[in-house]
Image (cartoon, rainbow, N blue to C red):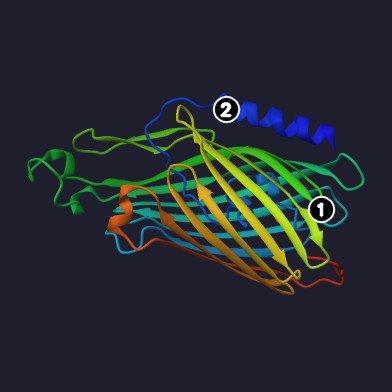
Amino acid sequence: MSYIRKITWNLFLLLLLFTNRSEAQQDPMFTQYNFNIQSYNPAYVGTWENAGFLVLGRHQWVGMSGAPTTYTLSFQTPVKFQNFALGMNIIADKVGFEKRLGANFDYSYRLRITNKTNLRLGIKAGVTTYTNNLTEYTGYPGDPEDPMFMTDFETKFMPNFGIGAFLSNEIFYVGISSPKILKTDFQNNFSNFSTTAELRHFFLIGGYVFELSDYLQFKPTFLARTVWGAPAVFDFTANFLLGEKVWLGANYRTGDSFGFVGQWIFENLRLGYGFDYSTTPLQSFHNATHEVMVSYELPTRRRFSSPRMF
């Protein structure tokens, strides 16, 4: 397994090269990132080795006005007798009066490294619509007649593309991706007020499964995420699979929050729940973050002796 450790370490060093200073991180975060990898890495498509859907809803900082809400819908399917897979991903994200709706198509190609290990290379391409209703903002500092807030950003259509790589077998995975290569800036039609609608993001994810007994598996995972010019944010999660039916885990996000995740497996159906509690001063203004996930794999004649680990 030395070559696997070498690849993982090299990918980690590569991600750190993208680390510096920046304005903000704009892509939504997920507590259940282990099972929603397609949202930010197109090379994940095909890893299920089966056609299936995933729906996720995230309500961040519940109780705070204008708090972020995110909904995702993903679909993936392998292509029979071929080494590639296809997928689709839709993300609706709202923060205050700022709204994004993205639709992307994913393609991955599989390269066999060994009999059990595959390297998938992926491409993501699609479009995002962006709106920001500036006239609805009230209570901001300054003159209520401020011309900066006297017009809206009209609906804008932003084409974009991304790339990714995903190395995996039954007990480990590591992936690196940049789901949006192009950076987009907008100006409104009245005051030339500008905003950065999309920034380049970089993701590195990894996990390994330890067999503790016939009924207990331990899977530590991590996700490193950064915007071009910003310090990386890390998620660390300790997951336990009980009796091949229930996932339970605890999560920590550097400088942001800690949380808990759970997933129940019913044959082809999975139900997941994530909970985040902020460690920042924002904790006094909201009632935590809640995330619900449902995935379903279409029935096939193939029978698996154990559930997939990611």
Q: Residues within 10 Å of mark 2 (few under 14, many from 20)?
A: some
Q: Which residue lies furthest to the right in this view?
A: 115
In-image side of 156 versus 235 (left or right) = left
Q: Which of marks 1 and 2 is nearer the N terminus?
A: 2
Q: Residue tagged by mark 1?
A: 170
Near-viewer residue (258 or 303): 258
Q: Residue at x 42, y 49 (%)?
A: 129
Q: Which residue is drawn at 76% across and 69% down?
A: 244
Q: How crowded is mark 1: few (under 14 residues within 10 Å), some or many (20 or more)?
A: some
Q: Which residue lies furthest to the bottom in this view?
A: 266
The percent coordinates of residue 77 (x first, y second) are 73, 58
The percent coordinates of residue 204 (x first, y second) are 62, 38
Q: Residue at x 14, y 51 (%)?
A: 139
Count of marks placed on residues: 2
Q: Residue tagged by mark 2?
A: 16
Q: Does residue 237 show up?
A: yes
* Residue type, label 2: Leu
Near-viewer residue (134 or 116): 116
The percent coordinates of residue 115 (x first, y second) are 92, 46
- The N terminus, quarter of image: top right
